Image: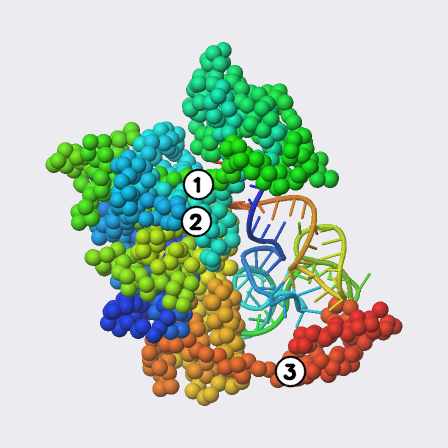
Amino acid sequence: MAQRRKQFPFDEFESQWQKRWEDNKTFSVPNPGDEGFDADKPKYYVLDMFPYPSGSGLHVGHPEGYTATDIITRYKRMNGFNVLHPMGWDAFGLPAEQHAIKTGEHPAVNTENNINNFRGQLKRLGFAYDWDREINTTAPDYVRWTQWIFLKLYNSYYNEETQKAQPISELEEQGFSREDIDNRRLAFVAETPVNWSPDLGTVLANEEVEEWRSKGHTVERRPLRQWMLRITSYAQRLIDELDDLDWPDGIKMLQKNWIGRSDGAEVAFTIDGEKVTVFTTRPDTLFGATYMVLAPEHPLVDRISSAGQKDEIANYQKTCAAKSDLERTELAKDKSGVFTGGFAINPVNQEKIPVWIADYVMMSYGTGAIMAVPAHDARDNEFAEKFGIEIIQVVEAPEGNEDKCFTGNGTAINSGFLSGLSTSEAKDKICAWLQERDLGKETINYKLRDWLFSRQRYWGEPFPVAWKDGNHYAIGEDELPLLAPMLEDYKPTGNPEPTLSKATDWVELEDGALRETNTMPQWAGSCWYYLRYCDTGNTDRFISEEAESYWMGKNGNPGGVDLYIGGTEHAVLHLLYARFWHKVLFDLGYVSTPEPFHKLVNQGLIMGEDGQKMSKSRGNVVNPDEVVELYGADSLRLYEMFMGPLEQVKPWSMKGVEGVFRFLARVWRLAMETNQEGEWVISEKLTEDEPDKKANKAVHATIKKVEEDIESLSFNTAISQMMVCTNELTKLDQVPVSSVVTLLQVLNPFAPHLSEELNAKLAEAFDSVSSDELANRAWPEFVEEYLHEDEIEIVIQVNGKVRDKISVPTEANKDEVEKLALESEKAQSFIEGNTIRKVIVVPGRLVNIVAN
RNA sequence: GCCGGUGUGGCGGAAUUGGUAGACGCGCGCGAUUCAAAAUCGCGUUCCUUCGGGAGUGCGGGUUCGAUUCCCGCCGCCGGUACCA
């Protein structure tokens, strides 16, 4: 069977250019102090979310973001920036460990294989990464600094007065006890109810639970002693400091909601002389509190429940404890609860109200106790109706509101000294009243919990910590990295005992101390990788001061990573964790900005050809390798950028790939044609004559448009403009070489292989064409004059409807245009019989004649 | 439920501060080239039409000389979150 001739020989030249870039280190960028570093150039740091090198290799979603950053990288380089554009591997993770359990092969081996595969795939797409800066989170020289940063967290506390992290040694100097100090570390041990997954053999962070559950794993709540990171101290800063970031509003909102600030008050009730504090966001409704609810796990439940209720209470507590979170929320829409037999005194009116326990109140939020105001809270209302508890209205809704249970702002009624006040006035007044009597105070609560940081897996960074006599202590920085030992058997223990505990030789230290056997979660490595890229090989520091200050510093910029592109799935995980670590490092003086990522862009998901999410089971997965094989890397890159707006979700189309492939072939044929023997030779149509007006206009309009579109990340419209330009040039009988080369220059960031290849071929044939690589040249400047038209088309509307189009000199003034428009016969035929009321002239666009 | 996003031809998608709706690409149709096909090139392609025009950007209103764009009220789809007091 005859081989179908390729429209252009991408399979021959793409790999050659890739090799050349690699051999010449075309995209390596020196650091301050290095040879070849040009301090006069401004810096630009473009970052991709680095991939987890899975066994299945790259999918089409990866090149979407990576091509976008690649275009920016190449474009910024051409515009005189020192561009940092690195790539690496987020390589700790469960699949490699599962593989080890199955085969007995060390996870590092499997990880290495996967990385080699990923690297090869990325290189075949021609990305302009500085491969000298490649990092791997599992490499000892990386683990070393992850552990080092952990020790910074361990050895710091949050000073509430200065609102920043400070060295723990300050507390030692102030004579705090060991226990107090340990309780204030940013990395600390606590026994709390955690998310334990028996089949994964590890605990999970709140942020991770949903993901694993959706993959079919069970997750249950269980009290365990674990390492935690005090992210809650940063809750307010993590909200406030979002303001100056150039992030999508949606992502900011997601983070804010996740952190979940609510403003309210704590109010002290008394039960049998025992003080019980509740948290409420509506202290103004205190007069409407008709019962109180404690969380089933509330420590006071035992003491206050009456003898007659004890059994029922105990039963209910047992049922709740056995329920998973899922059952307690999604499945249990119905309210349940038990009366304790106890009564609480409402401080504002001394009313005795019944105290219940119910699982709609969570021990982990607020104080684990609420005052229930069934008239103005939907949940309390439902509960009160079910159990027949009194409902007292204390807020009058504004006119027109008919809600059965009004939860908005209104006017206080039946509320003693608050009656008649607006909700916000009443809040202020009651808070002041409570505060005066020492019965309560204004409080802010956050949904955010401290970050559960330990895992029971093998394939993660060990904690640089050991235990002796029940106390933990940090191992010396000089002992880092602390690497996990080889194991015969990587199987989880099946209970919360970490896998590493099997390595008894490793665990037991000479002085009788025992190593911590938990490991860090996969997030640890990604919390600071963007810093390591700045100074990859540094063996003295995680990042040098000079490198940090140049790449991450302000230098007249907003500071931090200038552009960060990745998927939305990390909105509340990686992006929140990394911001937290960065702020700690900032407080301790290691980095120069409070935020790591100045501008964030989320690329939209690429769906399958059927419009469904790509998945193996649906059989709609597109393999990028196959696309490269059939159409070349440039086609894949170009297609993914042409599909639609970067941030939008969009379906794949193989026909669409063919479309951009055809476009590239047209560009190719602008410069090349086949001779009698069927070989590619320089096109006869090319000329070294000066481009005429038409050619200049086409090319310079393209420079302008592509430039604007790259700046706004509107790659799809930039490509469409280049298509227009190519079509225009193709139509010419004589094609000016200089015009073609300029088109190749603006196309280069998008389709680097083809554009370089053609430029090289043209350079051989024409003296006027430089043989310098396009990648190293300056971005062309468009000439405004070439864009100028002598005549422009003006639309003539009558009563807002287009009736005619006329050509007028560009310089024509309003009156002239109006005059010409009124002379239009077509327009007149529509005006006939009516009087002209008004004529609107929009210069350069249209004339609208209003007549009736 | 709440929060966010989104809705434009047969399809992916374009449209400066409100100013020619449908750029560009796909698909489709017709033609050229060819022994034939592929590839390529050219033309056409929102719908309706009595060929004068008329309608049209999820639906219903409003502001305006003029609305895909601004305002009010609905509806659909996608994502996040879910008893957070």
Q: At label 3, which amino acid type do we have?
A: Thr
Distance in Å between CA atoms under marks 3 and 2: 53 Å
Residue at far front of view: A436
Residue A216 percent coordinates (x, y): 40, 35
How would you rate the neighbour count of disc 1 (Cα within 10 Å): few for under 14, some for 14-19, many for 20 or more? many
Tell me the residue at 43%/87% (across/down). A688
SS of the residue at dot 3?
loop
Looking at the rendered structure, whether the residues under marks 3 and 2 are on a common chain is answered as yes
Tell me the residue at 69%/82% (across/down). A813
Tell me the residue at 28%/35% (across/down). A179
- Residue annotated with mark 3: A810
Q: Is residue A250 left or right of residue A577?
A: right
**What is the chain letter for disc 3?**
A
Q: Residue A448: which numbered mark, if any?
A: 1
How would you rate the neighbour count of disc 3 (Cα within 10 Å): few for under 14, some for 14-19, many for 20 or more? some
Q: Quadrant of the N terminus of chain A?
A: bottom left
